[in-house]
Amino acid sequence: MIIPIKPWLERASDASGQVADRVFSAGEGSEGFRGDSIQSGLRGKAHHEDKRMEFYHQPIMPREILAALEPVKGKQIFDGTLGGGGHSEVFLERGAHVVGCDQDAEALEYAGRRLAQFGDCFLPVRGNFSDMDSLLRNVGIDRVDGILMDLGVSSHQLDEPSRGFSFRDDGPLDMRMDDRADFSARDLVNDWDEAEMIRIFRDYGEERRAVRAAKEIMKARRQKAIDTTLQLAEIIERAVPRVSGKHPATRVFQAIRLAVNRELEMLEAALNKSLEVLSEGGVLAIISFHSLEDRMVKRFMRRHSTPFIDRPEWPEPRENLDYCLALPSRRAISPSDAEIEMNPRARSAKLRVAVKLED
Ligand SMILES: C[S@@+](CC[C@H](N)C(=O)[O-])C[C@H]1O[C@@H](n2cnc3c(N)ncnc32)[C@H](O)[C@@H]1O
């Protein structure tokens, strides 16, 4: 069976890769367009039925995600990054069934309360999205019609000092999304050797002062253990000059977070698993915030969406045995200016979408 390539993304992406709002005011299925709930998501309000729930996370590009995954009654969606449940909520409101996965117990607790009103249509599971096949099998599901991965950390994780992700407020140097993991930022900063730190500061943080930052850490930890986020931020400030209003520790903190949670390895595993788990015509949607992640997603999607491969040493192009995806758009989609204005954390987000072809 040939899966028709959905025309919506081709039409919707303008030259800058941004999606025009008007495209989504039509063709949203028989229920029509429910902009009210999307707007409430954009404003980042906690669920309206429970005013006591604090703000947790503002879902990124909800319109574009809806257009991509087309959640309707009877569809089964795996939300691999449940977070505050904002994306899952818009899927559930349209009648889809959602398995919401997060490795963070706090996210499951919060989203579980927020989405309890959807009863059996919502199933929260704790785990890593890289295990999506077994997580789904454990709840009796072999295939899903859509997969969403909204990568990275939630605003709640970033803003809560006790989670140790932030250099704005002091907290224990932790940065684990999954508190059952036995390796934290404190272990990395106090135990890793200099060369390993330089590598991740460069590769994951794209920090030009990687060597100096690692040397400052080595020097500081010889005096006493580095236990807190502000202690580490002050050490980094000695090595990295402040430019363009960004805190000097931004890149090093990002690198440590990616390493502690093995985020790139988990993404690579999840991308491969998604091919096993998606049903024919199913949609894979990934939002990334880091150039390394976006590059990995882009290469993966390209590799699986090219029907033939040609090499100079071959007499003719050969069939690509990995071909199993169609790309509605080869370009990444970016949030609209209006969304960025409302939610500056959306600024670096990139959405890529692929559709699974026949097995
Ligand atoms: C950006 S937030 C998702 C926000 C969510 N889409 C919403 O609308 O509220 C990312 C969430 O994914 C979780 N997460 C990140 N990597 C994960 C992984 N490999 N497996 C499971 N959960 C992960 C984080 O703990 C965090 O709660």
Image (spheres, rainbow, N blue to C red):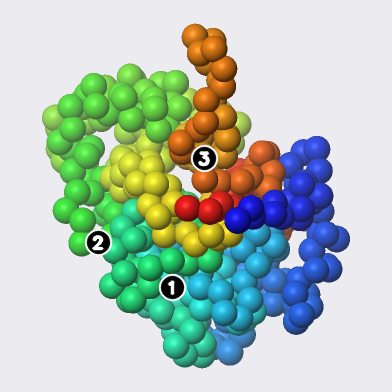
Q: Which of 320 and 67 is in front in this view?
A: 320
The disc labelled 3 sits on which kind of residue? Tyr
**How far across and down, in percent of the image, does residue 197 sit?**
27, 28
Disc ID at residue 159: none
The disc labelled 1 sits on which kind of residue? Val
Ligand 1 contact, mark 1 (Cβ < 8 Å):
no
- Among the two numbered marks 3 and 1 on one chain, the one whose residue lies closer to the N terminus: 1
Q: Can residue 238 be seen in this view?
A: no
Q: Nearer the viewer, mark 3 or mark 1?
A: 3
Residue plotted at (75% across, 81% down): 31
Query: Is the residue 72 above or below the residue 170 in the image?
Result: below
Q: Mark 3 points at which residue?
A: 323
Q: Mark 1 points at which residue?
A: 99
The disc labelled 2 sits on which kind of residue? Asp
- Among the two numbered marks 2 and 3 on one chain, the one whose residue lies closer to the N terminus: 2
Residue plotted at (31% across, 25% down): 199
Which type of secondary structure does the marked residue at label 2 adopt? loop
**How far across and down, in percent of the image, does residue 66 sit?**
66, 65
**How far across and down, in percent of the image, does residue 107 sit?**
40, 70
Q: Alpha-carbon distance for marks 2 and 3?
A: 38 Å
Q: Alpha-carbon distance for marks 3 and 1?
A: 27 Å
Quadrant of the rendered structure where residue 35 is?
Answer: bottom right
**How far across and down, in percent of the image, does residue 223 sit?**
14, 32
Q: Mark 2 points at which residue?
A: 179
